[in-house]
Image (cartoon, rainbow, N blue to C red):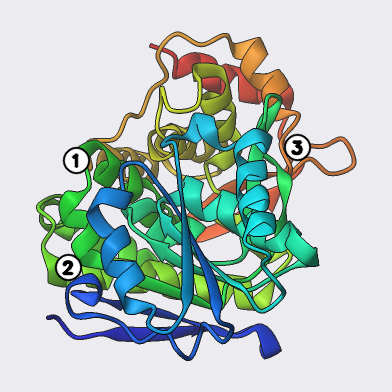
Amino acid sequence: MIDQETLQVELGERTYPIIIGSEFFKNGFIFDEWVSGKDCLIVTNEVVAPLYLESLVSQLKNKNVVSLILPDGESNKTLTIWSQIIDKLVAMKASRDTTVIALGGGVIGDITGFAAASYMRGIPYIQVPTTLLSQVDSSVGGKTGINHIQGKNLVGAFHQPKLVLIDIDTLNTLPKRELISGLAEVIKYGAIADYNFFCWLEKQMEQLLNRDPEILIKAILKSCSIKAQVVGDDEFENGRRAILNFGHTFGHAIENIKGYGEILHGEAIAIGMVLAAEISSLNQPDINRLEALIMSAGLPHKIDSINVDAMYEVMLMDKKVKANKLRYVLLRSLGEAFIDEDVSAENVRDVITNRVN
């Protein structure tokens, strides 16, 4: 077992820990401090359940545990699937001290968190993310939600978890494409907030792709610490937290146009980061470095056959639109992001066009 790391998301009375380590499923984890009531609902999916559900249930001693296994994939992050979680909570007569545990990747975390936020106007939940992307991004910060046909995560709520428990051993069963997808969000943190971390990633990408446990721990810890600090400063995204959306205005539109699940979230965000970098005032060598790091991770940097006008229309439905203006997260330099509302539509369309294969 490698050394366990813990950091806090500082939000006053809603402060919670992110615990990062290994062998939690193998050797057990004591949940008593975070599961105060007698009832517990574990929400997972058909891929993760055979791997980890039984182990997690066995660790919730002296609790009445009910599980719900959902279909896998981003295309299932819908109102219909969300309602199945609510129906399960009603059927088990869940009360406000029932704890919901999200066991899975970002889709499970988002939809389960939104159900916990909605049921009885909010009940406690725990994130147990099993993909790299969910470990470094979606499990932290309290953003929950479901997709709408017009856009990603258009329906949701801010609802902070009680605990985020990250076992890096789950990455050993993660398909390579999913691992690579998660690396997009790791690269994002270096690009927006920590130049030294960006440089470290340039040197360590091969070890990350080889799933070196010590290197993975360092990458996850640094990513989570950056996000925890940003969320602690701006929980409800009234200001600085928006920098976490670097590449996402483009990326979410690409996901919508291509079809959820046809292109993975991290793959779309990788392309989005390159597009955002080209709109930024970055010098060409820095744009080249970002693109090279994305490519070294095995991520795409161009879009395959997309309708530029259709993509821009989807972007206008983005949650970051304010006063009818799209707000873009751009880079002053590698490691420093800022928000710009004065980017012309013509400039955006030109950049997208130049990146279409």
Quadrant housing residue 225: bottom left
Say which element carries label 1. Answer: helix
Residue 232 to residue 276: above or below = below
- Judging by the rendered image, the residue that carries numbered circle 1 is 176
Instruction: Tell me which residue sits at (52%, 74%) in the image.
Output: 228
Residue 79 percent across, percent down from the top left: 68, 37
| Residue type pointed to by label 1 | Lys
Say which element carries label 3. Answer: loop
Residue 340 percent across, percent down from the top left: 70, 47
Instruction: Tell me which residue sits at (62%, 18%) in the image.
Output: 311
Labels 1 and 3: the sequence-earlier one: 1
Residue 148 to residue 55: above or below = above
Residue 242 visible, this angle: no
Residue 101 percent across, percent down from the top left: 49, 65
Which image quarter holds the N terminus?
bottom left
CA gap, disc 1 and disc 3 = 34 Å
Whether tag 3 and tag 2 are in contact, CB under 8 A, the answer is no
| Residue type pointed to by label 3 | Leu
| Residue type pointed to by label 2 | Ile
CA gap, disc 2 and disc 1 = 17 Å
The front one of 9 and 173 is 173
Residue 312 to residue 55: above or below = above
Quadrant housing residue 36: bottom right
Instruction: Tell me which residue sits at (23%, 59%) in the image.
Output: 170
Labels 3 and 2: the sequence-earlier one: 2
Residue 201 visible, this angle: yes
Left or right, 156 with reference to 271: right
CA gap, disc 3 and disc 2 = 37 Å
Mark in the foreground, 3 or 2 = 2
- Judging by the rendered image, the residue that carries numbered circle 2 is 215
- Judging by the rendered image, the residue that carries numbered circle 3 is 326
